Amino acid sequence: MSVLPDNWIRQAALEHDMISPFVEKQQRDGIVSYGLSSYGYDARVADEFKIFTNIDSAIVDPKDFSEQGFVTRTSDVCIIPPNSFVLARTVEYFKIPRDVLVICVGKSTYARCGIIVNVTPLEPEWEGHVTLEFSNTTPLPAKIYPNEGACQFLFLKGEGPCDISYADKSGKYMKQKGVTLPKI
């Protein structure tokens, strides 16, 4: 597998709608940067957040997920409580080619503030808004800024197309829109 460069990402985004909306040049003046970089794409976080709280003493159970454990907010800033996390989503909608696997890493601006971004790999032929988890590892409240950079996606080209893609197996998170909660 090799990491794909900016010219491949640009072509796939523009000709095959792999990333929409697509920002062809890094935006960075006074904001957390986003857009096309040398070997990746820095995606933005949307303004929709699910902030976890213990107000109703809910239990987080991936097999029986209860919406009582969080509050939903649409806002121009998100405050993550200390030692907590929020779910959000990318502004961009992704359509991954059959011979590509995408991994995500956090932005150094947030990492240096103790804010970690977690995303599982985007499998071949998966499509949708990417659900993001922001963890605040600090004992202080932390801010996330919508419509600014959140994480960087790296595109890895396989030696050939896979036998069974995410679309072939009708994956449960296929074509997700908005912040998508755990499913079994």
Image: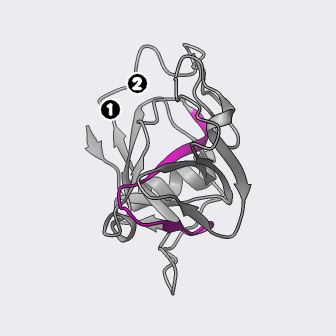
Viewed as shown, does residue 75 lie left or right of 105? Answer: right
Specify the farthest residue to the right.
74
The quarter of the displayed image where residue 173 is located: top right
Instruction: Estimate the x, y position of residue 13 in percent, counting from the top left.
Output: 57, 53
The quadrant of the image that shows the C terminus is: top right
Tell me the kind of residue under disc 2. Pro
Q: Which residue is mark 2?
A: 161
Q: Residues within 10 Å of mark 2 (few under 14, many from 20)?
A: few
**Span shown in magenta:** 127-148
The quadrant of the image that shows the N terminus is: top left
Write the residue at 55% across / 13% down.
Answer: 169
**Do labels 2 and 1 touch, CB within 8 Å?**
yes
Instruction: Estimate the x, y position of residue 10 in percent, counting from the top left.
Output: 50, 58
Reply above or below: 79 against 54: below
Label 2 secondary element: loop
Reply above or below: 3 against 35: above
Q: CA distance from mark 2 to mark 1?
A: 7 Å
Look at the image and say whether residue 171 sits in the magenta stretch: no
Q: Which mark is residue 158?
A: 1
Instruction: Estimate the x, y position of residue 144 in percent, counting from the top left.
Output: 53, 66
Write the residue at 58% across / 59% down.
Answer: 45
Tell me the kind of residue under disc 1. Gly
Instruction: Estimate the x, y position of residue 120 in percent, counting from the top left.
Output: 42, 36
Label 1 secondary element: loop
